[in-house]
Image (cartoon, rainbow, N blue to C red):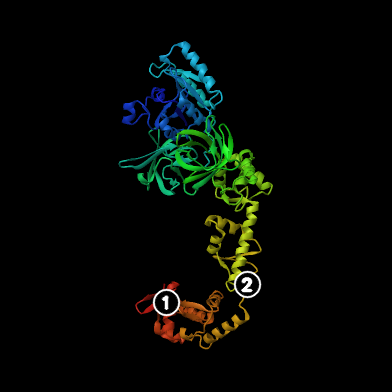
Amino acid sequence: MLTLGTAGHVDHGKSSLVQALTGINPDRWAEEQRRQMTLDLGFAWFNTPAGHSVNLVDVPGHERLIKQMLAGATGFDGVLFVVAADEGMQPQSHEHLQILSHLGIDQGLIVLSKSDLVDAEWLEFMTSEIQAQVANTSLANAPIVSVSARTGAGMAQLVAAIDRLISQLPARTLQQHNPRLPIDRVFSIDGFGTVVTGTLRDGNLSVGMEIEIQPQQLRGRIRGLQSQQISQQSVQAGMRVAVNLSGIERQQLKRGDVVTIPQSFAPTNLLDVIIATTADAPTLSHNMSLQLYLGSAEISCSLALLDRDSVPANTQAFAQLRLNQASIAQRGDRGILRRASPAATVAGIQVLDAHPQRHRRMRPAVIAHLQQLVNGLPHEILLQQLEQQCLTWQQLQQRSGLESQTALEGLTTSCNNGMIVIVSATLATLTASSLITSSGYWQQLQTKLRQLLAEYHQTWPLRQAMPREELRKRMGLEASSFSHIIQALAEQPWLQIEANQIKLADHQAQPSSSQQSQIQALLALWQSDPALPPSREHWPTIDQELWRYLLQTEQLIQIAPEVYFLPTQYQHMHSWVLTQLANGESISLAQARDAWQTSRKYAQAMLEHCDQLRITQRVGDVRVAY
C-alpha cells in the first residue's frame, strides 16, 4: 500500500480531484465545506483497476496554510501536482514544487485540472508552459494529464497513469527498521479514547504492541489499528494508519509527536545537516532564527553555519541546527527551513547525523567528517556513527539510515578490517541487541575501565573490589551496554568479576602493618570469650574502612546491629541450629543460650538472624524449621 498526496496552489481543484477519484470528500470540517477551501489535511483512498490500494493525502494550497501542507507531505511516496488549466502556475504552485524537490519527492504526475474551462489550443499552450517551468525540479520528467473533475473528462486516463506511476515506485526497504509514525492528527472517540493518525514511515505496528511517544517518552499500548476505516491486526510502512492508544491522554499529544517503540529513538536537540537554499532565498546568516519542518513537526531553531558566515540563494552548505525543543530524527531524513517573517521557504535540509556533538565552527576536521557522511561508503558511515559510543545493531542501522542488507555488508567490511568491534557477539551470531562500537572506542573503554578500577583500589586499598553498579555509573554507560561489555571482558586475565563486584586481578586488599596491629588488638577481645563478644563501649577506636575489611574478609560476622561473632563461633552456633532442626526438635531461647554458653541478648540476636535467613521461624516461644 502506497500513499500519494496532492500539492498545488489554492483553489486549483485538488480536493475536487480527490473526491472525483475516491468518492470521498476530504474536506471534513464544516468550515472547509462552507468556504470550499481546504484548511487542514484531508484523507481518502481508492483501489485502481490494476489492484493497487492507494491512500490520498489532500493538503491545503493557501500560503497561510503551508504548515499543514508540510505536515502532510512527510509521508508521500508520490505526488499529484495539480495546476488549474485556466490559471497556470501560481505562487503557491512554485513554493509547493520547491518543497517537493527539497523533500526528495521525485515521483508523481502533473494534473492539469479544470480542463473544461479552456479550449484545446490553450490546453496545449499551458502544457508546454508547465513543462518548461518544472524542467529544473524533481518533477521534470513527470507525465502531464489533463482532467476535469466536474465533467469526468480525462479521469480514466489519470487513473491509468496512477497505475503506471505506482508500478514504477521503488519498494519500501525499511520494514526491518523500528516503526516511526509522525502524528498529523490527534482526537478522541467516546468509548475508545485517544486516536492518532499519520503515515507509517518505517517498520510495522501491531495490536497489543507497547509503544512510546517521542520526544515526551510517554509509554502506552496499541488498543486498535485502522487503515482505510478497516480494522487491522498489523500495519506496514507506507500505510495511512489510525492508532487507538491506551494509557495516553489526548491532551498529552500534538501534531509533530512520533509513535515508535520503547528505546528505539533518543530525542535530540542538535542536527548535523546539509542545507540547500532555494533559488529565490534571501542570504542566510550564521545564528539566524528559522522554523524547521521535520516529519509532521514544526520546531524553532537557530542555524549554525560550520564552514562560512552566510549562504546565498541556490547554494549548499554544512550546518548544525540547534533546536529549541527536542525532536526525533535519523540520518537521511529530509526537512524544510522557513523564515517566519516575511514567511517564506528558504532551504531544504538533509540530516547527516541526528546525535552529533556541538561543533566549533571553521574546523577542517568537522567538515571532513560531514563530507564523509555525505559521500562515504556504507562501512565509513557506520564507523562515523560509532566514533565515541556503543550502539546495538538495531540502533546502528536506524541511525545510519542504511537499508538492512547494505548496513550488514558495511559492518562485515569494517569487522574484517578491524575498524569495528561486535562486543557481545560475532557476525555469525549477530542479533538486533548485539552491542557494536569502533575498535578505537573499544580500546578507550577498556583503558577507562582499568583506570577507574586502579583509582578505586588506590583510594580504598582495604576494599576487595568495586561495586559493579558504581563502576557502571562512573563509566557513564547504560545498564544493558555495561553488561555486554563486562561479559565480553570476563575472560581477560587483568579483570576479575566477583558476584556484584569487579576488580583488577592483581589487586589484593592488604592492611598496613599499623592497621594489622589494630586488627589483632580488636580480634583479641573476641577471642578471649567467643560466645560473649565485647559490647560496644569496650571496642577500641578503629577506622570504618578496617571494619569494612574485617567484614569483607569474614574475620568478623555481623548478625545484628553492633553484634559480631568470630567465624568459628558463628559456625558452631549455626551448625547447632541445623542439627536441632534435623532431629525434628524445636528451639527455645533458653535452650539456645545454654547450649552456646552465651547471654540471652546474643542468643536472641542469633535466633533472629536465623529467622532472617529463613532457616527458622518463630512459633509462640520456640523456633521450628522454616
Secondary structure beneath dot 2 equals loop
Relative to 454, does residue 411 appear above or below in the rendering? Answer: above
Q: Amino acid at mark 2?
A: Gln
Q: Please state, as top left, top right, bottom left or bottom right, where the C terminus lies in the image.
A: bottom left
Q: Position of residue 397 (x, y in %)?
A: 56, 44
Q: Position of residue 517 (x, y in %)?
A: 59, 84
Q: Which mark is residue 231?
A: none
Q: Residue furthest bottom?
A: 528
Q: Position of residue 175 (x, y in %)?
A: 52, 39
Residue drawn where x is 68% and y is 47% of the image: 416
Residue drawn where x is 63% and y is 38% of the image: 375
Which residue, given by chain and number where applicable, does mark 2 sit on?
Answer: 508
**Would you call the spot at circle 1 few (<14 residues within 10 Å), some (14-19), or many (20 or more)?**
some
Q: Earlier in the sequence, mark 2 or mark 1?
A: 2
- Side of 576 relative to 192 (left or right): right
Q: Amino acid at mark 1?
A: Glu
Which residue, given by chain and number where applicable, does mark 1 sit on?
Answer: 608
User: Which of the two residues, 465 or 136, is positioned nearer the viewer here?
Assistant: 136
- Side of 379 relative to 499 (left or right): right
Relative to 40, does residue 420 appear above or below in the rendering? Answer: below
